[in-house]
Image: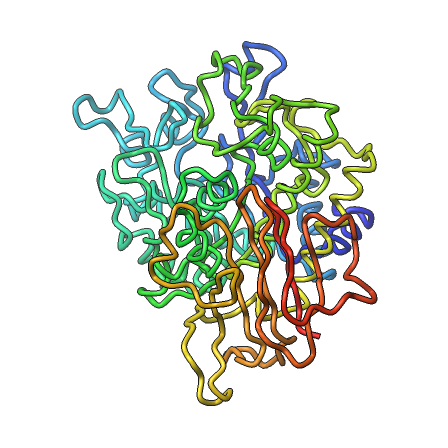
Amino acid sequence: MASDRVISYLKDLGITSVELMPVHHHVDDKYLVDRGGLRNYWGYNTIGFFAPDFRYSSDKSPGGGAVREFKEMVRRLHENGIEVILDVVYNHTAEGNHLGPTLSFRGGIDNLSYYRLDPKNPPRYYVDFTGTGGNSLNASNPPYVLQMVMDSLRYWVLEMHVDGFRFDLAATLARQLFDVDRLSAFFDIVHQDPVISRVKLIAEPWDVGPGGYQVGQFPALWAEWNGKYRDSMRRFWRGDPPGMMGEFATRLSGSPDLYEENGRRPHSSINYITCHDGFTLNDLVSYERKHNEANGHNNEDGTNDNYSVNFGVEGPTEDREILAKRMRRMKNFMITLFTSQGVPMLLGGDEIMRTQQGNNNAYCQDNEISWYDWNLDERKKHFLEFVKLVIHLRRNNNVLRRRNFLSGERRPDTGGARDVIWLRPDGTEMTQEDWSKAEQKYLAVHLSGKVRDPYDEEATNGDLILLFNASDRDVMFNLPHSERGWKVLIDSVSDSLQYYPAPPVYQDRYLLRADSAAVIQEM
């Protein structure tokens, strides 16, 4: 049930959509059960594509208590202006590999039709594009698998009233035989379906098979988890490698290189710094190595490419200087995320500095490693209020929510104003040479409120200056001329948790500290 307390928390934070991890009924992997104390906590082991898992319901009666409670949850969230997106797993099932278990599709229905089989040794062995050590559903089979998937999707829209789906390892669904084909039968059917084509469709645009990394390659109706955004922003703030400024600006602009050519818009890019799969935000600035020993895979599971930093100590510390650096870096990430064009996605718990103790693959940890600790100390309370601040900054300034990509071109209807100008610290425009300079780790972004998005009926809220400094030295920025002057809204160095009520006016310059970010608004 969506309690009043939970809904109030989400609304106060500024959340407009929640993406639920898999709610379809799933089975715990036998090898986890045999180890004792472990289970498939994330739920990515589906067997019932039409049934909400009764383990998440307080009413576990066989008469539909879980269905009733799920509908009530969706209704309550909708009444409070919050959409519901489901993470769905149609790329594989809980029936595993040739060793089983055999639950339904394999033995009870039609193994040859439902699964992708190894052509060298069918029907015993399975092809696995998902990295689960099991199977891959044959989504290129229209009479059986595709019908089941589409019926399931329509059920969750028409009966359970969800607003959209995030498709786990969506590249697997796009495979015709063994190659990824974004014009596959799955997309053809989705696009012409009168129900599914009208809800939000979000792809995790990769799988572990050959050619499976498909960021930017999905059709026009789809948004994507932008893994390039995640990696680029982490690397920029870590300073590794040098010369990341051009990449940083491209991702900040909504990744037009990925989405503009095929007619998509900034909202096609789901921007994120962290997600369930990987480090939490707190761990991203506290660990340089994964610590997945509790999973029982000899710390060999989970990615090694985290682009993280610990500021001198691996894990928890009482060193105030290190804690201050970690806090500033987390604020930098939040300012970056919520001032980027596109759709920001915040990992639940990051706002209260949740830690998984360095575990970056906590899929099997239904314990303190994954749980939320709501006993917030002063640092966590401070960061929670800061996250609220940046979310509401975004919601209150539609120049951060453009529906078209930034062009930088002069608009005659606005007296020659441009929607964006990229500036060096001396106030002059960035040149082509500047973008690739190894030492260029700082810039100002001038977003014009004079240029209205043609698809946005709201009046803009004035000009914004975004300042970013990923270097290890303070940088003085010359600000564009303004008759009214500028006021500071947010600075990651400041402890202020509100827009300055009587802000200082800066006519021409602003000093941005090392490893920090700031947002400045025209008075």
Relative side of 368 to 477, left or right: right
Q: Quadrant of residue 498?
A: bottom right
Nearer to the camera, 198 or 393: 393
Q: Taking the image as drawn, is residue 91 in sight?
A: yes
Whether residue 151 is visible: no
Q: Identify which residue is drawn at 74% across, 60% down.
A: 80
In the image, taking residue 74 as reference, residue 114 lies left or right, namely: left
- Location of the C terminus (image quadrant): bottom right
Task: Note whether 156 is above or below 212 in the view shown.
Answer: below
Residue 268 image position (x, y, % from top left): 45, 59
The residue lying toward the viewer, choosing from 142 and 191, is: 191
The percent coordinates of residue 471 (x first, y second) are: 53, 44
Nearer-the-camera pick, 66 or 360: 360
On the image, the x and y values in percent for residue 58 come to 75, 36
Q: What residue is drawn where x is 82% and y is 50%? A: 4
The residue under the point 67% across, 72% down is 507
What colour scheme was applied to this rendering of the protein? rainbow
Determine whether 55 is above or below 268 in the image. above
Q: What is the tally of numbered marks visible in this picture?
A: 0
Above or below residue 331? Residue 38 is: above
| Quadrant of the rendering where the N terminus is positioned | top right
- Residue at far left of view: 120
- Judging depth in this view, the residue of 429 and 319 nearest the camera is 429
Residue 406 screen position, x and y as percent: 45, 69
Toward which corner of the image does residue 367 lie, by quadrant? top right
